[in-house]
């Protein structure tokens, strides 16, 4: 697995430990104390780096190609996934899969963005950037969930909605805007989870929910750090400063009250252990569903409305 730039000290220590172990074996020299000291230093270094990640470093982790995507979470955390296709207007958008599944014994409807790990898969999934028909398919499936009284789980992982000419011709702004209105009125529990990237309206188009959760190293923002840096500093090299200023990381958004829960990831990021990340995801989402199911439909809709009404309100010291 290719390490990120800030993980280089960890890689160097791991290489030194491997070299010591190799020399100990080939030269039949007892290096147990030296190896033990290096392993402790490696542990301390990991703690220092991963417990003090900057917002920009979290963005890098969120974009890691080995990070678990929507279908990986379905594989490790759900059962009986049955995918449904098409928006009944234009066609099927493979960057926005969805269908029925079972989560810890609870029947649910799952929708979300799906990226690819290589060029072929990214072209198939349009790099996780959905077309208008993706958002219309998502809403069609959510209406089915409402009909059958099933909780909706929305998995967000996109740099943004597709900005191409075809998407504009098929009115992507209307598709997203319509979803915002209709999701606010759906009479069934909605849980949204930002898995990696939560970019702009492309994320919000399936992000209106009773509870909004984020994986620990995900980010959620109206614009990418590079885009913000290009506007404010006139150069993308200032993306780290932009990420810091915009408060786009999960811990910051939790403190601001813009999300409801941060889901713990394996040390170093979800890409190091897909199964553990999926287990943490499943536990958190199941708990949120149980809490919402304890409310009446009227209480749930009022709480959803009030949740989004207070977004943007801020009081200084």
Image (cartoon, rainbow, N blue to C red):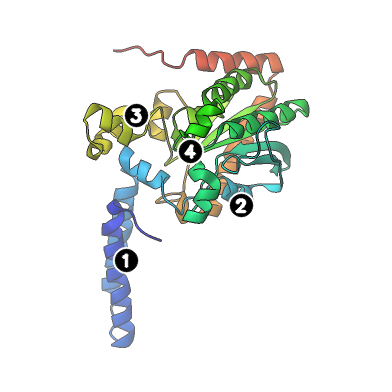
Residue 262: x percent and y percent? 47, 35
Q: Secondary structure at mark 2?
A: helix
Name the residue located 61 percent from the left edge and 33 percent from the top edge: 133
- Which residue carries the number 1 mark? 14
Q: CA distance from mark 4 to mark 2?
A: 21 Å
Which numbered marker is on residue 247?
3
Q: Quadrant of the N terminus?
A: bottom left
- Which residue carries the number 4 mark? 158
Callout 1–callout 4 Cβ contact below 8 Å: no
Q: Secondary structure at mark 4?
A: strand
Between 186 and 303, the one lying in front of the other is: 186
How many dots with numbers? 4
Name the residue located 59 percent from the left edge and 16 percent from the top edge: 303
Place residue 70 in its image quadrant: top right
* Residue neighbourhood size for the residue with mark 4, other residues' Cα within 10 Å, grouped as few (<14), some (14–19), many (≥20): many
- Which residue carries the number 2 mark? 76
Q: On the picture, is 99 further left or further right than 60? A: right
Between 135 and 270, the one lying in front of the other is: 135
């Amino acid at each position: 697995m290719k390490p990120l730039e800030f993980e280089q000290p960890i890689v160097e220590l791991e290489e030194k430990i491997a070299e010591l172990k190799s020399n100990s074996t080939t030269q039949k020299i007892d290096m147990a104390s030296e190896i033990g000291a290096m392993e402790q230093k490696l542990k301390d270094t990991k703690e220092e780096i991963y417990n003090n990640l900057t917002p920009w470093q979290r963005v890098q982790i969120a974009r890691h190609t080995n990070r678990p995507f929507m279908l990986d979470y379905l594989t490790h955390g759900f059962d009986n996934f049955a995918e449904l296709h098409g928006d009944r207007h234009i066609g099927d958008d493979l960057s926005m899969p969805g269908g029925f599944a079972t989560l810890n014994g609870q029947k649910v409807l799952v929708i979300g963005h799906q990226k690819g790990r290589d060029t072929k898969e990214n072209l198939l999934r349009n790099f996780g950037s959905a077309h208008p028909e993706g958002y219309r398919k998502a809403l069609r499936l959510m209406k089915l969930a409402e009909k059958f009284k099933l909780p909706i789980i929305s998995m967000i992982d996109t740099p943004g909605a597709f900005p191409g000419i075809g998407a504009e011709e098929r009115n992507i702004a209307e598709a997203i805007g319509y979803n915002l209105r209709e999701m606010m009125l759906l009479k069934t529990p909605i849980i949204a989870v930002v898995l990696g990237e939560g970019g702009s309206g492309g994320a919000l188009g399936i992000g209106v929910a009773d509870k909004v959760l984020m994986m620990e190293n995900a980010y959620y923002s109206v614009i990418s750090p590079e885009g913000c840096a290009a506007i404010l500093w006139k150069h993308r090299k200032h993306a780290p400063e932009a990420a810091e200023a915009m408060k786009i990381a999960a811990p910051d958004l939790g403190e601001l009250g813009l999300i409801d829960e941060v889901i713990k990831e394996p040390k170093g990021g979800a890409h190091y252990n897909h199964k553990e990340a999926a287990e943490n995801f499943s536990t958190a989402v199941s708990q949120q569903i149980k809490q919402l199911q304890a409310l009446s439909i009227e209480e749930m809709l009022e709480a959803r409305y009030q949740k989004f009404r207070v977004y943007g309100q801020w009081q200084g010291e």
